[in-house]
């Protein structure tokens, strides 16, 4: 049985509900917001069709835009993240040909997964806050939001990944 048939929709729903009802209301110092939903794109398996990744990511982003009052920002950022995910994942994995690989600390190793997560989340936050602010007139505020949200999101993703893929 294909695990993605259940894993992706379940992860989609859980991350969306968690982001909308809990994490959107948590801000540190008025700029750092945890964006756990990017984990949806980070954890997509290596061999998944690029068009399917982009459709799933766009749908999650659009749904979050609807509830977060960020018209198009999440949809655009999630779609871009899904577009670059296969290429960034290839930079951090050492195995060739494993098309069923789902990125996690237990499958690709702790250090490669941390580096992969940092790059993906940094790219996501840079694009997200650039589109949200639409200017660099307040560069310091933009930088605070990018750095703070990146650190908070990476820490949260690593904790969630550790809980989900805990070795017995």
Image (tube, helix red, strand yellow):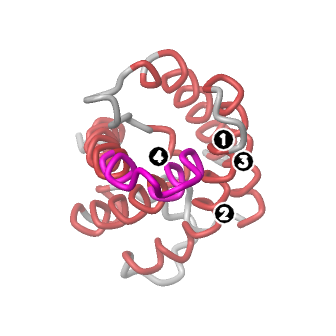
- Give the labeled residue for mark 1: 61
Q: Quadrant location of the C terminus?
A: top left
Q: Closer to the camera: disc 3 or disc 2? A: 3
Quick one: SS at disc 4?
helix
Q: CA distance from mark 3 to mark 1?
A: 5 Å
Q: Between disc 4 and disc 2, whose residue precedes?
A: 4
Q: Between disc 1 and disc 2, whose residue precedes?
A: 2
Cβ atoms under marks 4 and 2 closer than 8 Å: no
Q: Closer to the camera: disc 4 or disc 2? A: 4
Q: CA distance from mark 3 to mark 4?
A: 14 Å
- Camera-side residue of 35 and 28: 28
Coordinates of residue 124 in the picture (x, y in percent)? 49, 56
Quick one: SS at disc 1?
helix
Label 4: few (<14), some or many (≥20) within 10 Å?
many
Q: Residue at image x 33%, y 29%?
A: 30
The answer to if 121 sits in the magenta stretch is no
Quick one: SS at disc 2?
loop
Q: Quadrant of residue 49?
A: bottom right
- Give the labeled residue for mark 2: 48
- Camera-side residue of 156 and 32: 32
Residue 99 disc label: none
Cβ atoms under marks 3 and 2 closer than 8 Å: no
Label 1: few (<14), some or many (≥20) within 10 Å?
many
The stretch of residues the image draws in magenta is: 126-144
- Give the labeled residue for mark 4: 39
Q: Residue at image x 46%, y 58%?
A: 126
In the image, is residue 136 above or below residue 112?
above
Coordinates of residue 130 in the picture (x, y in percent)? 53, 55
Q: Between disc 3 and disc 4, whose residue precedes?
A: 4
- Give the labeled residue for mark 3: 58
- Camera-side residue of 14 and 26: 26
Quick one: SS at disc 3?
helix
């Amino acid at each position: 049985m294909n695990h993605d048939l259940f894993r992706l929709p379940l992860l989609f729903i859980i991350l969306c509900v968690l982001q909308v009802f809990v994490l959107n209301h948590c801000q540190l110092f008025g700029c750092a917001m945890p964006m756990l939903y990017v984990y949806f794109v980070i954890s997509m398996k290596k061999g998944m069709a690029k068009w399917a990744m982009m459709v799933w990511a766009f749908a999650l982003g659009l749904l979050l835009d609807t509830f977060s009052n960020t018209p198009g920002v999440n949809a655009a950022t999630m779609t871009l993240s899904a577009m670059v995910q296969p290429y960034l994942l290839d930079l951090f994995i050492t195995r060739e040909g494993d098309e069923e690989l789902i990125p996690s600390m237990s499958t690709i190793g702790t250090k490669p997964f941390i580096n992969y997560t940092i790059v993906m989340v940094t790219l996501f936050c840079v694009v997200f806050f650039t589109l949200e602010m639409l200017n660099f007139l307040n560069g310091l505020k933009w930088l605070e939001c990018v750095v703070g949200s990146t650190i908070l999101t990476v820490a949260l993703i690593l904790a969630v990944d550790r809980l989900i893929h805990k070795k017995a």
